[in-house]
Amino acid sequence: MEKLTVNIFTDGACRGNPGPGGYGAILESPGYPAKELSAGFSRTTNNRMELLAVIEALKSLKRFDVEAIVFSDSKYVVDAVNKGWVFAWQKKNFKDKKNPDLWREFLAIYPKTKPKFVWIKGHNEHPQNERCDKLAVAAALKENLPPDLGFEVLKNTVKDALF
């Protein structure tokens, strides 16, 4: 029996870096209705939103016996996985690396699906990437956004380490 394929399209956006940000994701599989995900945060970074889009999409899968293919315009995310950087970072406990909280969360779900990653050029009229961008931007523009607690903790840890 052929494995079911789930195509996952993701994008992150940030108004300022750091600033209000959001992510968008679309999951598509033949024979199933497409699913859209998005959320925004009051203060975060673009790279955090790019990575969180992937994490939330993978976490939303109800089955792990699928071939998951993640399409992202984030070289940060795609290269970190495809070039094995994240696995080397993990071995060094993410010393001096950004977003260790999210990378740990990614690595917790990664073995369940072992997704493939494909880089796509952003803002290049790719329909799903453009839709994910709209979802991410709309999420970042919402009122009364919650804090990105991981960003706040990391920011305070670095700040505390300077004094």
Image (spheres, rainbow, N blue to C red):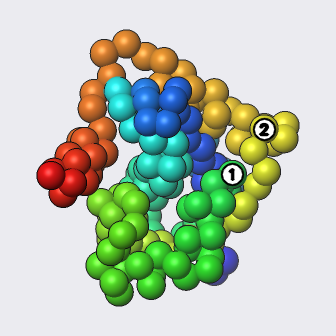
Disc 2 on helix, strand or loop? loop
Q: Give the residue at mark 1.
A: 73
- Hey, what amino acid is under mark 1? Asp
Q: Which residue is at the far top?
A: 143
Residue beneath label 2, please? 123
**Pointers 1 and 2 in contact (CB under 8 A)?**
yes
Q: Quadrant of residue 137?
A: top right
Q: Nearer the viewer, residue 65 or 15?
A: 15
- The spot of residue 80 in percent (x, y) is 55, 71
The crowding category of the residue bearing disc 1, from other C-alpha atoms within 10 Å (few below 14, some 14 to 19, many at least 20), is many
Res 70 visible:
no
Question: Residue at left 63%, top 49%?
Answer: 9
Residue at 62% across / 65% down in the picture?
78
Q: Residue at left 76%, top 55%? A: 120
Regarding mark 1 in the picture, which secondary structure is present there? Answer: loop
- Position of residue 102 measured from the top left corner of the image (x, y, whole percent): 36, 58
